[in-house]
Amino acid sequence: MNLSATTFLLDPICLSASTQRGLHVVINSSVSSAHYTILGQSRNEVMLPDNSPSVSMWPYLLSSAQTRRLNTISVYADRGTSSTQTRLLYMNAGALRVWREMGMPVNIVGETNRPPRTAMLSFGMPFAE
């Protein structure tokens, strides 16, 4: 299990019992607290330049007249550890939304609050929200 990609909630559920109405469950936290989705790209995908956000996202934003979205996009790239995950892309929600709109392959392998220190900014703004 990769602990760096796992989100733990502190006191996420509070149980309260009432003698008149039974058991009540109160949710104290949101489960979706990860800010970056991790995508894995295979060796074959990495060989195609258009599968790189730094190459393909800006032309897409220009051609679709959506350049204002650049301020909401944050993509980091890091080296993978196998031929099925040669490159790891860390995308925030805005970047993932654009990537899917572009029809690019999405192979989600995890989530994290921040990319690791070894990852480099590939496209967009650092830690955009």
Image: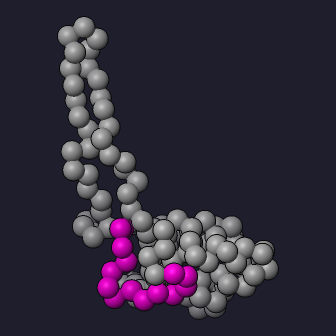
Percent across and percent down for residue 54 are: 59, 88
How many marks do you count on the picture? Answer: 0
Could you tell whether 58 is left or right of 18 in the image? Answer: right
Could you tell whether 47 is left or right of 12 in the image? Answer: right
Against 21, is 32 above or below? below
Quarter of the image where one finds residue 120: bottom left
Please tell me which residue is depicted at 55% across the width and 82% down the height of the picture. 124
Percent across and percent down for residue 26 are: 30, 32
Q: Which residues are magenta?
A: 112-125
Residue 118 shown in magenta:
yes
Which is nearer the eye, 129 or 34?
129
Residue 42 shown in magenta:
no
Please tell me which residue is depicted at 35% across the width and 68% down the height of the picture. 113
Screen quadrant of the N terminus: bottom left
Color theme of the render: one colour
Please tell me which residue is depicted at 37% across the width and 48% down the height of the picture. 30
Could you tell whether 55 is left or right of 79 in the image? Answer: right
Against 115, is 19 above or below? above
Percent across and percent down for residue 108 are: 48, 67
Residue 89 shows in the view: no
Residue 5 shows in the view: yes
Quarter of the image where one finds residue 109: bottom left
Could you tell whether 117 is left or right of 69 in the image? Answer: left
Percent across and percent down for residue 79 are: 40, 88
Please tell me which residue is depicted at 27% across the width and 70% down the height of the picture. 4
